[in-house]
Image: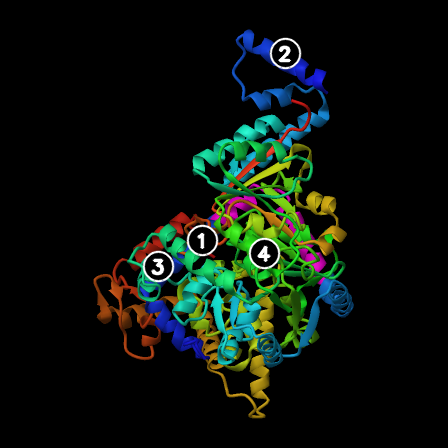
Amino acid sequence: MPHESAPQDFFAASEAAVADTQLRRKLENATGRHLDHVAATRAEFPAYDAERDAARRIKEESIARLDDLLVRLKERLEANGCSVFVAADAAEARKYIVGLARERGARRVVKGKSMATEEIELNPALAEAGCEVVETDLGEYIVQLRRERPSHIITPAIHLSKEDIGLLFNEKLHISYTSEPTALTAAARERLREVFLAAEMGVTGANFAIAETGTLVLVENEGNGRMSSTLPEIFVAVMGIEKVIPSMADLSHFLEVLARTATGQKLTTYTNFISGPRRAGEADGPREVHVVMLDNGRSAMLADPVLREALYCLRCGACLNVCPIYRRVGGHAYGSTYPGPIGSILSPSLLGGATAALPFASTLCGACREICPVKIDIPRILLHLRWKETTANKGGDGALPAPEWPRAAESARDGVRTFSRMARHPLRARVLGRVAALLMWPFARRGYVRWMPPPFSNWTRVRDFPAPRLRRRRKARAKIEAANGGTKA
Amino acid sequence: MAEFHKLIANVREALENQGAPAHNGDVALAEAVPTAQAARRVELASQFARELQAVGGHFLGTPTPKETIARVLDVATALNARSVAVGAGISVDPAPIVDALERAGIEVFRTAPVADDAARAVLRQTLAQCDFALVEADYAIAATGTLAMLATPDRPSSLTLVPPVNVILVNIERILTDLAAAIAAIGAEAIASHRLALVTGPSRTADIEKSIVLGVHGPRELHVAAVWQGND
């Protein structure tokens, strides 16, 4: 396993991440810029909402008749000259691709940016078989050099500053230190160009698969996907079975919303359509095209009427950027290929293990649902998964370890109940406030309570509390009441 | 058509003599064409130009085929180019441009169907080493500044991917409003039997602190001329 972040406890990891102020600065900076771009692009495209509704409707229809569409897609792909392999799980997919590399004697493999291949942990398997695997998306290349996982679906190196990357390239590529993005990109271009020209096999994902024509659509900005699917003799696309859409005419609705939401572009630089191997006389394109249709838990998601909606996901990554949790802890804390709100749904469903606790790592604020280009009701599905996880454990069959999060959630619920009981009554609320202020007062330093003994340390460990003002409280309240027109209900 | 263009040229000259505000020559020509269709073409071309520039591309205007030669030569000169790879034309004949490039001392490589792996290797090597590529796009999309390019044996996909600079010609009549229109015009069956690339601006990344850098794997410069067909 080259990934150093093994399955882990979100609670512990997020605590460390929150304390990393550098990381928070980088995340706030990158996600903030992203949101500005998205807002600007959407504002100048009046048809955005109509296109979004159309995309949602097509996904609903496609997932509802996924069986027919997959049959049709497979027929068309094969008619176009592609080989289709259906992988029930990650192990089957890995075995097929590794076997193919062995059989064809492919030693050098280039990869375009793909979440599905991250999901099946293809790289370690290929490396074990003696292949040199190179990630060619710049962000993926950077995290591969650091032997890390990507920390964002769209921007894998979002957790690194240009100085971090400068040091990395200085060490690994032996170029003199620079933190200039243009120079760093040029250095990577030069290295990767050689790799592309020599590679025997290219592997990418697919954003859409069109059943009508047997066409894979690959969306990207750098050219890594286009290179990987154009230059090597053997091309493998790994697609989740939910990626299929009925016809070519449906595609534009998705493309009109995908880039606008993912990166704030109108369209990505490259939208590549691949329907089969090269034809007679053609210089480019692979001799062989293999399409791996990946189930790996997706048909189980389909069987759950609430969870099914998560299969509409386009992997745009926007829900990560708006999520108040993601923006503070970053992707690595989730300990999964798929971080953030949608990751907290996909990970337990596709990857299992410790990620079962991720649905509890959300405030359910709903920002993800607002920005989702296909309007997935993420909070609803998270609640559904919490319910499933909690009841599964209450069943007491001992199959699953008792998770930490439900208990934390229960104690939080008890706390809220107590508070609401007190707060409903003005006198009680005043007494409670007074008692709390008196308790906190001895710990106040320079306007803030930064430390308190247990159990209050649960709060002060990660947050400061404004120091209580014992004298001025009533005056302040009178002011508020006056501002509210003196009619406080 | 020849008379028609002559008329327009006369009108333009007359306008200039009257001290009318100086226009970009081509836009003035286009605006003067008294048909709704031509006006629409110009509108789409200017929208395309705006969007292309917004994504970091360069717009070379709406030249006639003859004027196109000079525009391409200008780019080649600015690049200090010594070699160019040229794809087969679709509706714009590249031969006069190729002649001019050769006369300017630039080595021209014409892409042609490859017969075997050896020819394929030669093509790869040539494309990797040439200074720029010149090729015609099938369609352009005004709303997004996008070029649609179907790969054929004499117009391979790597022509617009491997060289560091691309000069793309597109027939002004083939600039369409939006993505849906372009996909419909190309047709599902053509896409099923050819590789299609929609290209919107030069290759770019925002992977390092979200700052935009052009020319990651694909071309770092993209120049587009919307060629106004007809006799010069």
Amino acid under disc 1 = Ala
Q: Of helix, strand and loop, which one carries label 2?
A: helix
Amino acid under disc 3 = Ser
Residue underneath mark 3: A161
Point 68% across, 13% down: residue = B7
Residues drawn in magenta: A37-60
A47 within the magenta span:
yes
Q: Earlier in the sequence, mark 1 or mark 2?
A: 2
Q: Of helix, strand and loop, which one carries label 3?
A: loop
Magenta-colored segment: predominant secondary structure: helix
Disc number lying in front (4 or 3): 4
Discs 2 and 4 carry the same chain letter: no
Between the residue at mark 2 and the residue at mark 3, the CA separation in whole angstroms equals 60 Å
Q: Residue furthest top?
A: B18
Residue underneath mark 1: B206
Disc number lying in front (2 or 4): 2
Q: Chain of mark 1?
A: B
Residue underneath mark 4: A219
Point 51% across, 77% down: residue = A355
Residue underneath mark 2: B10
Amino acid under disc 2 = Asn
* Residue in the foreground of this view, choosing between B91 and A484: B91
Mark 1 Cα shell of 10 Å, populated few (<14), some (14-19), many (≥20):
many
Q: Of helix, strand and loop, which one carries label 4?
A: strand
Point 44% across, 38% down: residue = B79
Between the residue at mark 4 and the residue at mark 3, the CA separation in whole angstroms equals 25 Å
Q: Quadrant of residue A19?
A: bottom left
Instruction: Give the percent coordinates (x, y) of residue B200.
Output: 56, 46
* Residue in the foreground of this view, choosing between B38 and A103: A103
Q: Quadrant of residue A278?
A: bottom right
Instruction: Give the percent coordinates (x, y) of residue A245.
Output: 71, 60
Contact? badges 4 and 3 (CB < 8 Å): no
